[in-house]
Amino acid sequence: MRWDTIEAPHGAEPPQPMTMRAQSIPARHAFPEHAHDWHQVVYAISGALTVTVAGGSFVISPEQAAWLPTGLRHRVGSLLGAEFRSLWISEGAGGDVPFAHPTVFRVSALLKALIVEAAEIDGTEDVDGYTGRVTHLIIDQLRRAEAIEVAPFVRTGIRSF
């Protein structure tokens, strides 16, 4: 099965403390392997995402997200298509999130609503501090997130995508 490549954004600025990215991922499309100088939360408000890291890969649904720590090489794609939301979290803001390694965690109804709201207000001027409050609530929810034990797919000589 052939997967097409999605171009990753170039010249991305470090998050201060968080950057939201919202994007549709068509079926059988993936970002090439890459790493960031910040933490990343990989989430889909609909559809499913495949996240591949050294040692394995896993599929997440809208009830789950993946925490990818700073510097971790990874790929993200979708077999059937997804509404992708990526939260880039600065080192300082994500420093006390309790995940030191790639982790799949439960997305509460509140966290999902906050992610949807953050995408809606992305790019608007934060004149009354609302955007900052939403950002801080998201980071608070990440600190409280419950890890899910998942067994990653075993890596073979075959690329997952």
Image (cartoon, rainbow, N blue to C red):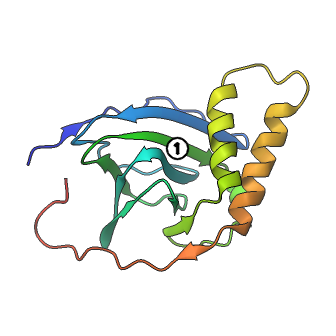
Quickly name the residue at label 1: 86
| Towards the viewer: 68 or 111 | 111
**Residue at figure coordinates x 67%, y 49% from the top left:** 90
- How many marks the image carries: the answer is 1
Q: Position of residue 118 (x, y in %)?
A: 67, 36
Residue 138 pos. (x, y %): 72, 50
As drawn, the residue found furthest toward the left would be 1
Seen in the picture, residue 29 relative to 75 is either above or below; the reply is: above
Place of residue 155 in the rendered image (x, y in percent of width and height, measured from the top left):
21, 73
Amino acid type at mark 1: Ser
Q: Quadrant of residue 140?
A: bottom right
Which quadrant of the structure image shows residue 158? Answer: bottom left
Q: Is residue 157 left or right of residue 134?
A: left
Classify residue 80 as left or right of residue 139.
Answer: left
In this rendering, does residue 132 appear at all? yes
Q: Residue at x 40, y 32 (%)?
A: 24
Say whether residue 128 is left or right of residue 47. Answer: right
Asked if residue 45 lies left or right of residue 52, the reply is right
